[in-house]
Image: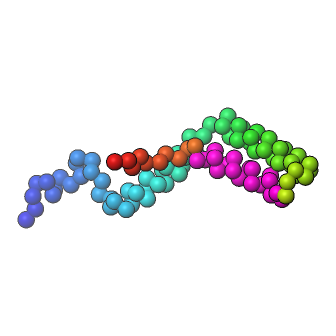
Amino acid sequence: MTTATAELGNIFGRSTRSARSRRVMRRRLMRRAFLADITISEWIALALLAWMLAMVGWSVQLANWGDLPNIVPTAIIAAVIAFFMTRVRFRNNTV
């Protein structure tokens, strides 16, 4: 025997997907939105910052101001990580 609510099924907009599949879908959408939200001017700013850091690191290496063999890659990677970390929204888990 079925009830009337069972026959109506999904009329209230409730998803029939499992919680895990909803989480996976949400993560995929967030990844797409993560990169799609960045404007061309921000990409240009990142490229200019990376170029500037490469030139500064290169000049420091040429001047032999320190015993640091990997200044340029370290500076560029740090700039890219900082750029993308500004896009991440952390949950506020304070009590």
Residue 51 seen in the figure: no
Q: Give the prevailing secondary structure in the magenta stretch.
A: helix
Residue at image x 88%, y 46%? 59
Q: Nearer the viewer, residue 5 or 42?
A: 42
Residue found at the very far left of the displayed protein: 1
Q: Position of residue 15 (x, y in %)?
A: 30, 53
Q: Is residue 47 left or right of residue 86?
A: right
- Give the vertical position of 24 relative to 59 (above or below): below
Residue found at the very far top of the displayed protein: 41
Residue 29 seen in the figure: yes
Q: Is residue 9 left or right of residue 59?
A: left
Residue 76 magenta-highlighted: yes
The colouring scheme, among rainbow, by chain, secondary structure or one colour, is rainbow
Q: Quadrant of residue 2?
A: bottom left
Q: Position of residue 25 (x, y in %)?
A: 43, 55
Q: In the rendered image, which quarter contains the N terminus? A: bottom left
Q: Position of residue 10 (x, y in %)?
A: 24, 52
Residue at image x 47%, y 54%? 27
Residue found at the very far bottom of the displayed protein: 1
Which region of the structure is painted magenta? 68-85
- Give the vertical position of 91 relative to 45 (above or below): below
Residue at image x 74%, y 40%? 49
Q: Nearer the viewer, residue 11 or 31?
A: 31
Q: Quadrant of residue 87?
A: top right
Residue 82 magenta-highlighted: yes
- Give the vertical position of 37 relative to 7 (above or below): above
Q: Quadrant of residue 86?
A: top right
Q: Position of residue 71 (x, y in %)?
A: 80, 53
